């Protein structure tokens, strides 16, 4: 037996890599079509989404304005530096002025806004949103009394507001009130202020 056998080298197989042809025309058209459809859906829904966000921001702004009046009232904020006047403060809404509302100092302590002499800050409603309804409620019946004007005032040291509503027939105090706001597409939000000082957005 020959211990030294001739080792024959094995033949190596060669493989050719086939180049990938990339997207076919059909695949490209399908991809572009999907992209166009998704983009179209986003663009169509964007105005509605944007409107809802703007309305939500407005509801928060109204709630914060009422809360700011509460802070001013409880802290006995002086009306004018050196005036020595520390009045009740309030937030005022008027159904005839659907794109503005106000924070004011109730210098004559009558629980309502009496014009520019008491004005502290004006808030402007934008993006074509508007205040659509003011309602006053009593806990006993929970029926909306449509209001032409609404004043929510706070006096030190009480954090609970006086809610005064004006109707065509006169004025009355209410247990709670709602401020409804509306957007051009018809979306609505409601800010509720209770006589115990709670504020909610629905």
Image (spheres, rainbow, N blue to C red):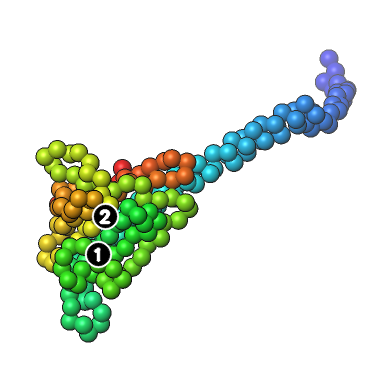
Question: From the image, which quarter does the C terminus lie in?
Answer: top left
Quick check: can you spot residue 148?
A: yes
Sequence order check, earlier mark of 1 and 2: 1
Q: CA distance from mark 1 to mark 2?
A: 9 Å
Point 25% across, 67% down: residue = 114
Q: From the image, tell me which residue sits under label 2.
A: 149
Judged from the image, the secondary structure of the residue bearing numbered disc 2 is strand
Residue 117: name its quadrant: bottom left
Q: Given the current orientation, which residue lies at the most extreme bottom position?
A: 82
Judged from the image, the secondary structure of the residue bearing numbered disc 1 is loop
How packed mark 2 is, by other alpha carbons closer than 10 Å (few <14, some 14-19, many 20 or more), is many
**In the picture shown, does residue 54 fall above or below 15?**
below
Quick check: can you spot residue 61?
A: no
How packed mark 1 is, by other alpha carbons closer than 10 Å (few <14, some 14-19, many 20 or more), is many
Label 1 close to label 2 by CB (< 8 Å):
yes
Q: From the image, tell me which residue sits under label 1.
A: 113
The spot of residue 19 in percent (x, y) is 83, 31
Question: From the image, which quarter does the N terminus lie in?
Answer: top right
The spot of residue 197 in percent (x, y) is 18, 54
Point 72% across, 28% down: residue = 30
User: Is residue 13 toward the left or the right of residue 87 in the image?
Assistant: right
**In the picture shown, does residue 31 fall above or below 83?**
above
Q: Nearer the viewer, residue 114 or 20?
A: 114
The spot of residue 50 in percent (x, y) is 49, 46
């Amino acid at each position: 037996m020959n211990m030294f056998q001739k080792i024959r080298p094995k033949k190596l197989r060669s493989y050719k890599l086939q180049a990938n042809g990339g997207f076919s025309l059909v695949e490209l058209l399908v991809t572009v079509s999907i992209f166009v459809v998704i983009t179209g859906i986003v663009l169509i829904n964007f105005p509605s989404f944007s409107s809802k966000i703007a309305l939500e921001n407005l509801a928060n702004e109204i709630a914060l304005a009422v809360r700011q009046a509460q802070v001013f009232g409880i802290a006995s904020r002086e009306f004018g530096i050196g005036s020595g006047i520390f009045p009740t403060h309030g937030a005022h809404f008027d159904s005839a002025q659907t794109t503005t509302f106000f924070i004011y100092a109730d210098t004559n302590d009558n629980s309502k806004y009496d014009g520019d002499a008491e004005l502290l800050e004006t808030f402007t409603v934008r993006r074509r949103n508007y205040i659509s309804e003011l309602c006053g409620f009593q806990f006993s019946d929970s029926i909306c009394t449509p209001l032409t004007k609404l004043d929510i005032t706070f006096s030190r040291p009480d954090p609970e507001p006086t809610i005064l509503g004006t109707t065509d027939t006169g004025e009355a105090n209410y247990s709670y009130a709602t401020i409804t706001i509306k957007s051009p597409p018809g979306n609505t939000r409601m800010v509720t202020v209770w006589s115990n000082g709670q504020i909610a957005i629905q």
